[in-house]
Image (spheres, helix red, strand yellow):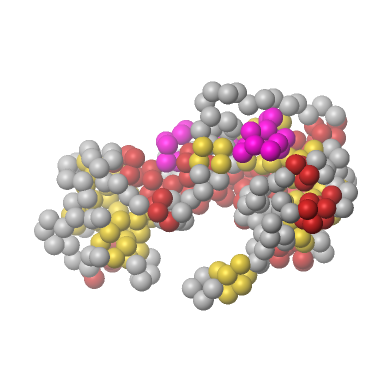
Amino acid sequence: MRVAFFGTGDIGIPSFRWLLAAPGTEVVALVTQPDKPVGRHQEIQPPEIKKIALERGVRVLQPVKMRVPESVAEVQALGADLIVVMAYGQILPKGVLDAAKLACLNLHASLLPRWRGAAPIQAAIGAGDEKTGVAVMFMDEGLDTGDVLLMREITIAPDETGGTLHDRLAELAPLALADAVALLRQGCAPRTPQPGESVTYAGKLTREHGQLDFFAGRETVARKVRAMNPWPAATTGFGGRRLKIFSATPFAEPVLAPGLLRTREDGLLIGTGDGCVLATDVQLEGKKRMDAREFLRGNPITDGEIAG
C-alpha cells in the first residue's frame, strides 16, 4: 500500500513512525508545512517530522499553498493508495482528497462531532470534559465533517494539561490508525455520518486566548490554566507586565475579590468569582519560569494589589 502522510505538528509523529514500520506499507511522501522561523532569534527550522522523513529517505513536499494547481498535481502524481492527515495545517482541496485510490483519512484529536477545529485538546480540558480521544474519519471538503471510520477514547485525568493530553493522544493515534488500516485492507471499513446535533468547535489558538478572567469560577480558571499549559499559557497582568501561570489549584476558601492577590507560604493566591486559585508555577515576562515561592521572594505583593 502506497501511503502519503500529511502532517506538521508533533502530535502526528507517532502515527508517521507507525506507517514507516508497518508491513506492506510504503510511505511515498511526507507533505508538511514550509520551514519557518522559530525561537527568540527567529532561526529557520524545519518541522520535526521533516527531519524524521529525511533520515528515512522519504520524499518531502512543502507547498506554500496546497490549493494551487501545481501543488494538487504534485500530490496526484504520487499515486498514493492512502492519504493520512494529522495536524497538517492547511485545508485540502477536492483534487487532493480524491487523489488517493483507497481513502483520504484524517486523525482528529477529539470524539467527533465534539470539538471540530484546530484546538480540540485545549477545548476539552477547558470545558471540563471527562473523555476525549482520536477519531479516524474519511475527509471531505468541510471542517472535520467527514464520515467517521472509528474512534478510540481515553479519560481526561483531573490534573491533565494541554501538554500531557497532547502526548497521550499522540500515542493513541497510531493504535487507531492501525485498526483503521486493517479494516480498509479487509474492505469492511464502516462510514458513520456524524450526527447534526452536539457539534462544537474549537478555533485556532492565539496568545490572546490565554488571558484569564478571574470573575469566572475557580474551577473554570483552574481548567483554563491547565488547558493552556504549555502554550499559549494562561496569563494575567502583574505590575505592568504579563505573568504566565502554568499551575493553579482551586480553593473555596479564602473568598477573595476577583483578581485580588495574597501570598501564601506555598504560592500565590488569586481571587476568583467564587473563591480563589493557588498559583504555584509562574513566569514573569522577560524572566525564567519558576516556582511561585521563588517568584514572590523577588516580587513582593502589596496590600490590595489586583492581577489583570
Q: Position of residue 156 (x, y in %)?
A: 49, 38
Q: Can residue 22 be seen in this view?
A: no
* Residue drawn at x 41%, y 50% as measured from the top left: 209
Camera-nearest residue between 53 and 66: 66
Classify residue 10 by image quadrant.
bottom right
Quarter of image, res 250: top left
Q: In which quarter of the image is the N terminus?
A: top right
Q: Does the magenta stretch include residue 133?
A: yes
* Image quadrant containing the C terminus: bottom left
Q: Residue 195 magenta-drawn?
A: no
Considering only vertical position in the picture, is 35 above or below 77?
Answer: below
* Res. 162 visible in picture: yes
Q: Is residue 99 above or below residue 10?
A: above
Q: Residue 55's spot in the image, x, y percent?
A: 77, 66
Q: Position of residue 162 (x, y in %)?
A: 48, 49
Q: In this view, does 150 lie above or below 293?
A: above
| For residue 60, side relative to residue 254 (left or right) | right
Q: Which residue is drawn at 49% across and 73% down?
A: 40
Magenta residues span 125-148
The front one of 30 and 140 is: 140
Front-lying residue, 298 or 242: 242
Residue 204 appears left or right of 170:
left
Q: Residue at x 86, y 40 (%)?
A: 101
Residue 61 sits in which quadrant? Answer: bottom right
Give x and y (percent) for residue 51: 71, 65
* Residue name at image x 27 percent, y 50 percent: 278
